[in-house]
């Protein structure tokens, strides 16, 4: 825990876990008849959700980790550092809250989660937008999310920075390398399609963190085909 990079990432991870917990609580209330609310079933559901949330947050924070890697120690907690960090956190909170809000609305009105696995991701996103816009005011949702984002940023802002001095570049490089190894192991060893919380289909769908599911689909539809094309060209 006595790490400059880790200290700067903790508030982001805490927000991610808290908002996922809030969504799980809301869905448990809305869909109590369909869900298996047994103690062990909910523990397993929460465990899978916790795992996929943590992994997706690690992926999404990679650009910020690289920013911290190249941040000169003398600029730590400077006006520019504060502006960049608060802006990045605000964008993250805003987009994450939109995802959770859309997930709740889909469950409430259509009894389904954000299921990217069986769709072409961009067409699916457009389809979701059309579905939501037909039933709700998109601008109203965005305004509510913006207000929520403002409140969260004000609450988390004091924790986004640390008095722990930034270490040498070599030390930051080492910590960044370890961070990338963790991301790589998570990428290679966690498969959302094989993570099953319970035999209840609704518990399993709720346990799938939306961003993580989208990342796996992007990997399947974009990254792996691109890698195969490069390999085929190199072999010719």
Image: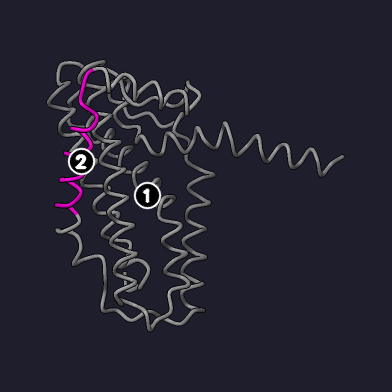
Q: Was residue 141 drawn as part of the magenta stretch in this picture?
A: yes
Q: Was residue 38 drawn as part of the magenta stretch in this picture?
A: no
Percent x, y for residue 76? 34, 77
Horizontally, residue 178 falls left or right of residue 151, namely right
Q: How far is mark 1 from mark 2, CA to CA?
A: 19 Å
Of circles 1 and 2, the one toward us is: 2
What is the quadrant of the N terminus in the image?
bottom left
Is the residue 202 above or below the residue 50 in the image?
above
Q: Residue at x 40, y 27 (%)?
A: 125
Which residue is label 1 attached to? 57
Q: Residue at x 46, y 82 (%)?
A: 168
Q: Are marks 1 and 2 in contact (CB under 8 Å)?
A: no
Horizontally, residue 19 falls left or right of residue 191, namely left
Q: Residue at x 23, y 33 (%)?
A: 101
Q: Which mark is residue 145?
A: 2
Q: How many marks?
A: 2
The range drawn in magenta is 135-152
What is the quadrant of the C terminus in the image?
top right
Marked residue nearer the N-terminal end (1 or 2): 1
Q: Residue at x 52, y 35 (%)?
A: 218
Percent x, y for residue 211? 38, 38
Percent x, y for residue 77? 29, 76
Q: Secondary structure at mark 2?
A: helix
For residue 68, what is the image quadrant? bottom left
Magenta span: predominant SS is helix
Residue closest to the eye, 95 or 4: 95
Horizontally, residue 27 falls left or right of residue 53, namely left
Is the residue 130 above or below the residue 194 in the image?
above
């Amino acid at each position: 825990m006595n790490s400059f990079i880790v200290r700067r990432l903790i508030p982001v991870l805490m927000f991610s876990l808290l908002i996922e917990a809030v969504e799980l609580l809301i869905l448990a209330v809305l869909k109590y008849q369909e869900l298996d609310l047994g103690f062990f079933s909910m523990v397993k559901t929460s465990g899978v959700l916790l795992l996929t949330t943590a992994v997706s947050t690690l992926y999404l924070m990679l650009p910020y980790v690289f920013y911290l890697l190249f941040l000169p120690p003398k600029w730590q907690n400077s006006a520019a550092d504060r502006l960049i960090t608060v802006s990045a956190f605000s964008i993250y909170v805003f987009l994450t809250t939109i995802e959770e809000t859309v997930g709740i609305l889909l469950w409430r009105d259509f009894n389904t989660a954000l299921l990217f696995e069986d769709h072409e991701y961009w067409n699916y996103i457009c389809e979701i937008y059309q579905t939501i816009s037909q039933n709700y005011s998109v601008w109203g949702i965005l305004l509510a999310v913006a207000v929520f984002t403002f409140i969260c940023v004000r609450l988390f802002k004091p924790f986004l920075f640390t008095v722990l001095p930034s270490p040498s570049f070599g030390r930051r490089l080492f910590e960044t390398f370890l961070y990338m190894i963790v991301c790589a192991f998570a990428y290679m060893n966690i498969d959302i399609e094989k993570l099953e919380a319970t035999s209840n289909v609704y518990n399993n769908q709720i346990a799938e963190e939306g961003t993580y599911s989208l990342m796996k689909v992007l990997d399947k539809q974009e990254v792996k085909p691109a890698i195969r094309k490069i390999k085929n060209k190199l072999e010719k």
